[in-house]
Image (tube, rainbow, N blue to C red):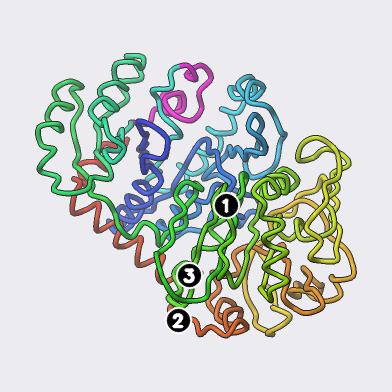
Amino acid sequence: MTKSLMIQGTGSNVGKSMLVAGLCRAAVRRGLSVAPFKPQNMSNNAAVTTDGGEIGRAQALQAKACGLDAHTDMNPVLLKPETDVGSQVVVQGKRMATVKARDYAVMKPTLMASVLDSFNRLKSQYDLVLVEGAGSPAEVNLRTGDIANMGFARAADVPVILAGDIDRGGVIAQLVGTQAVIDADDAAMIAGFVINRFRGDPRLFDDGYAMIEQHTGWRGFGVVPWFSDAWKLPAEDALDIATPVRSKGLHIVCFKLSRIANFDDLDPLAQEPGVRLTMLHEGQALPADTDVVIIPGSKSTRGDLAFLRAQGWDEDVRAHYRRGGHVLGICGGFQMLGHFVDDPDGIEGAAGRTDGLGLLDVETVMTGDKRLSTVAAVHAPSGQRFDGYEIHIGRSEGPDRARPFAQVAGQDEGAINADGRVSGSYLHGMFADDGFRRAWLAGLNVTASQGSYSTTVEATLDSLADHLEAHLDVSALLACAR
């Protein structure tokens, strides 16, 4: 019979996704067929699945750790924030609605059936399902109708391992406090705990570890030191964007938009030794030595146009272009480069039109249909074939479309301006294709490494599993599954 185990955290961003990915790889290496699962996720970094839907990027990485293609059952409910108070709700890979937070609280209990439907399908196909929680079970004000943590664990009878993050401080209170505030029946689902992200000598925490065991009665499965290669894996949370510090190389600057989406497009560039990648944060000016500006995807194109202007980045980009610099817009960034973005039906927010940057002679109209697909493309300037994916709404048309960025199934895709220094494309994932990345960098007079991005990710997943095996009692932890 299929067994399952759930990793919950004492808070958001405590490393649950990484722990599940490492445990997935460790379990696969034990000869088990394993699938990841997250009942509810909130992220604008999504992956397109083989069954034509979308899920959170972390579950796609966990699927890779299991040797599987991503499938919508691995993350049946995905929330994609569009404003501070509203999110797009994606159920089993398809957009259902855009709702405000208070309306989602009413909708949430109705989604448990879809969650359990997807979970049970996975259980019918694999030896082990490793589940990731969301946020924290200590958010007891959200317990009614919960589908992400203890509500799911209880409904599906899945035992829980609770992870605390010592790097943020107060880990004893994180774990003991969680037990103190949750319902006794919820607490009974917890089989033990792990301490994550320790810096220094873990033996220095022996007394604290013993205190947690004494106060909670839970078994500890180990202390995980900081995994220094985590930056080599695709990050799901914009807070986790990390780039190596380099003083030389082609300087690529990417704007960290307020609703940045699918920012893992940049990860392969960050690993190129001939590239210096800077994520430009709110309030920072574009560095004078910038060679290439990348405007990334956004879950709210018009909203992020306003955000971009509020930082003065619109003038920075124009000045950069006048100085001879290059600009690439990906998906929402492509839309921003045109003359305007028109949303007559209010698909991404209030209906209206917002002026773009005017660096590409195109115009965008938002439409209700969402394009989700993997694609095989040919880069028009270089003739290089590559794989990518589309995940967007809206259509962009105009004279610069006569100079396409790529060809997809015999059709023009994207646009390039007359002098070739401003490009826009709806295609994500292009830099993960080693051939394309080398060809694109060659066009900027940079010789790329001969390494494989996919091979690097696979090797890092193996290193992560080794890291967990060295510091956790993984066999005992997995034995808690039922």
Q: Residue at x 31, y 62 (%)?
A: 462
Tell me the CA gap for discs 1 and 2: 26 Å
- Asked if one can make out residue 455 in the rendered structure from this viewpoint, the answer is yes
**Residue 319 vs residue 347: left or right?**
left
Crowding at mark 2 (Cα within 10 Å: few <14, some 14-19, many 20+) = few
Q: Which mark is residue 449?
A: 2
- Locate residue 46, reporting x and y percent: 58, 50
Nearer to us of marks 3 and 2 is: 3
**Marks 3,2: beta carbons within 8 A:** no
Q: Which mark is residue 256?
A: 1
Q: Which residues are magenta?
A: 141-159
Nearer the observer, 208 or 243: 243
Nearer the observer, 297 or 219: 297
Q: Earlier in the sequence, mark 3 or mark 2?
A: 3
Q: Amino acid at mark 1?
A: Lys
Q: Amino acid at mark 3?
A: Arg
Q: Which residue is mark 3?
A: 276
Residue 86 found in image quarter:
top right
Q: Amino acid at mark 2?
A: Ser
Disc 3 is placed on an element classified as: strand
**Marks 1,2: beta carbons within 8 A:** no
Q: Residue at x 64, y 48 (%)?
A: 311
Q: Residue at x 61, y 79 (%)?
A: 440
Q: Earlier in the sequence, mark 1 or mark 3?
A: 1
